[in-house]
Image: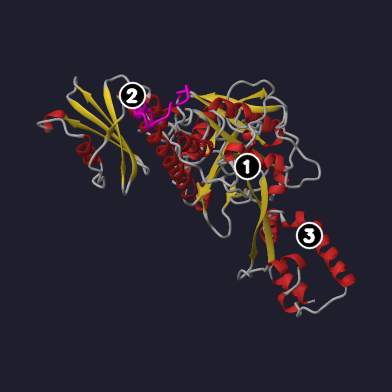
Amino acid sequence: MEREKRNDMSFSRKRSFTFGAYGGVDRFTCGDETRPETAEENLLDSPAGDRKPFLPASSNQRDTELFEIIEKLQGSRIDEQRCEFPLPLKSQLLTIGADLPLILPPKLGGYWVDPPLQRLVDVSPTSSHYGFVPECYDIMERDREAKIYHKFFRSRYHHSFTAVDPALGPLVLSVCLEEEDSKLRVILRMKECSLHGAFSVSLFPNIPSAVELAKMLCDRVTVSKFEVVSYLKAPELITTFDEHRVSPNFKFGVLYQKDRQFNEEDILSNNEESEEFKELLSILGETIQLQGFTRFRGGLDVCHGQTGSEAVFTSFHGREIMFHVATKLPFTDGDPQQLQRKRHIGNDIVALVYQEGQSPFLSDVIKSHFLHCFLVVRRIKRAEDTSETAYEVSVTAREDVPPFGPVLPDPPIFTDRALLREFLLTKLINAEISCYKAQQFSRLELRTRSLLLESLHAELCTRSQCMMGDPSIASLPSSEGPRVVSEGSGGFIENFKRAIRVRSHSFETLGVPRKIGGSASQRPKTEKDGEGDRSPGPLPADSLGPSEIKDQASPQEDT
């Protein structure tokens, strides 16, 4: 009785989330206040007041209680992982007769919505002002200074230097004299960022030293000496490091939300595609057969059909985009969560939602550690006396994601298909680039850059000493290609995995023993190191080169 009263006073909404291909439960209670639950309450589903002191029980009693616990766990596991609108909100939405907004922010906040809800009062589908000209749709650059070295240094005679600062860590300095413009161009690479500057030669009576140039860019530099890089292929390694964040490839999720669908379970379980949804997919790109597909595959399997037979792909201003369309990913009977679909869409950073009907999309209805932004599109009638259709667009993102362009028109309605395509694809790309500035991703990027810079510094020092004939350095492997991340590898999460591998390789080259449980040197060479890429965290594949890692990688790894 007491338990029923408690359920009447408050209700709980329990949602599933994904990290890679794994699931868990994020639990909170919707009511006047949040009530923490202990593990015992969760398993036995009993109020705190009903718990009794432990008393010795017979073996039969203990067995009975154990089977009851197992039955509760098995019977309510799916119910616990369901993600639904709160029932009062759901019932209110179904009784409203007027047009509803495309997106509703969650009750607990944490997301911004564009256009804001208060602006939607004045939105009229019959307005004559639609969209902006495509020339206004500028694609953001993720790292504007990434290609400065390639542009100004690679084709000119220049020098590079390395040092280890007690406070800043590894430093890699590049200096180039542009005689035609009488300029001295300098790049200083640190763990936090790269600093670039161009100085007029007339400012100096003599060419400054490497230490002086480094201090001109960053006054925190305290080293007293830099070492010269004499390795002939150093420019390749430096270019690869500078451009490790530059990738022409993107992957986005596409969700299909039918009318009166308010939870993640229903949205991910849609299999049939309406003609209207197919039309939107044709605006985004071309439906391709995955079997034997040779261009950017966005983590989809192109050999064994494990991720479906079709996908949507497009090229856009020199970039390749793969869409993870929920309805085209494998459907699993008996799995309400559809983890085979969520393992891809839940690992995307941005997703597009196509709405069919008037049911709004709740910003946090799809629970994921990676998804930070949603673009929601709804097909509407421009006017009752014409068959011409239009598309209304709205955007929502987590509160720590900075705003990004292109700006939504007022009202946010498009009637031209080509204009809509230009806007959506530009908005999706800019959304992902802007999401990288969110706190979660910025911390991971900083960690990735630190590992890559340590590897670059170690590689340049070792190769330079070998070039100078240092007898203390053993002969290096004949494969002297860049051991850092290959350009356009598909995302900084993959860069982080490879950074771990590169760092381990550099330690081995320098003769530094790695602290790994067991004997790594005795590990059988037949072990499938590439399988480590299937897990969310980076697992080193130290014994494999870059080409071997690619061959061993699982079908779900981005290429």
Looking at the image, is mark 2 or mark 3 earlier in the sequence?
Answer: 3
Q: Is residue 290 left or right of residue 149?
A: right
Tell me the quarter of the image containing the C terminus: top right
Q: In the image, residue 293 lies at what x, y percent? A: 64, 21
Task: Residue 342: name its quadrant.
Answer: top right
Looking at the image, is mark 1 or mark 3 earlier in the sequence?
Answer: 3
| Amino acid type of the residue that numbered disc 1 sits on in the rendered structure | Ser
Looking at the image, is mark 1 or mark 2 earlier in the sequence?
Answer: 2
Q: Nearer the viewer, mark 1 or mark 2?
A: 1
| Amino acid type of the residue that numbered disc 2 sits on in the rendered structure | Lys
| Segment tinted magenta in the rendering | 462-481
Q: Dot 2: what SS?
A: helix
Report the predominant secondary structure element of the magenta stretch: loop
Q: Nearer the viewer, residue 229 or 429?
A: 229
Q: In the image, residue 522 lies at what x, y percent? A: 61, 37
Tell me the quarter of the image containing the N terminus: bottom right
Q: Which residue is mark 3?
A: 73
Residue 151's mark? 2
Q: Nearer the viewer, mark 1 or mark 3?
A: 1
Q: Is residue 374 left or right of residue 216?
A: right
Q: Which residue is mark 1?
A: 535
